[in-house]
Amino acid sequence: MGGLLKTPSAPAPDPEITKAQERTEARLAEDERTKLAQIAARRRARQAGGQRLLLSSIREDAEKGIQETLG
């Protein structure tokens, strides 16, 4: 009768399942890190890219900037 009222204990976790979960979590964490690094790289490129293009050595007069005259 004591076995009817006692709560059963949880079975031990399967080590193979635990390892698979750890690998999945590690892969997801790495994916998140790479995505954040890509976002940061795009942000840096957007902030610094404009100045670099305006002061490019390809342009004839880089310090002058872009000036277009109409007419």
Image: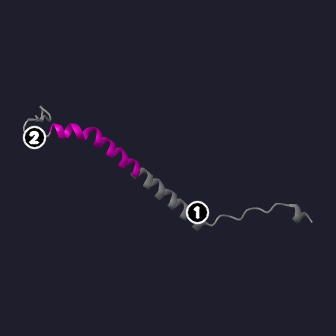
Q: Is residue 45 magenta?
A: yes
Most distant residue in the right direction: 1
- Considering depth in this image, is 17 or 51 the residue closer to the camera? 51
39 in relation to 65, above or below? below
Q: Label 1, secondary structure: give it.
A: helix
Question: In terms of image quadrants, where is residue 20?
Answer: bottom right
Q: Which residue is mark 2?
A: 59
- Disc number for residue 18: 1
Given the image, on which type of amino acid does mark 1 rest?
A: Thr
Identity of the residue furthest to the top in this view: 64
Please identify the dominant SS of the magenta region: helix
- Relative horizontal placement of residue 59, taking residue 3 as reference (left or right): left
Is residue 11 part of the magenta span, yes or no?
no
What span is colored magenta in the figure?
35-55
Residue at left 13%, top 34%?
67
Residue 47's disc number: none
Q: Position of residue 34 (x, y in %)?
A: 39, 52
Between the C-alphas of marks 1 and 2, the distance is 59 Å
Q: Is residue 22 left or right of residue 11?
A: left
Please provide percent x and percent y for residue 45: 28, 43
Foreground residue among 22 and 58: 58
Q: Position of residue 14 (x, y in %)?
A: 63, 67
Q: Amino acid at mark 2?
A: Arg
Q: Position of residue 61 (x, y in %)?
A: 8, 35
How does the figure colour the protein chain or chains?
one colour
At horizontal 37% and vertical 47% (from top left) the residue drawn is: 39
Q: Residues within 10 Å of mark 1 (few under 14, many from 20)?
A: few
Query: In the shown orientation, is residue 53 left or right of residue 37?
Result: left
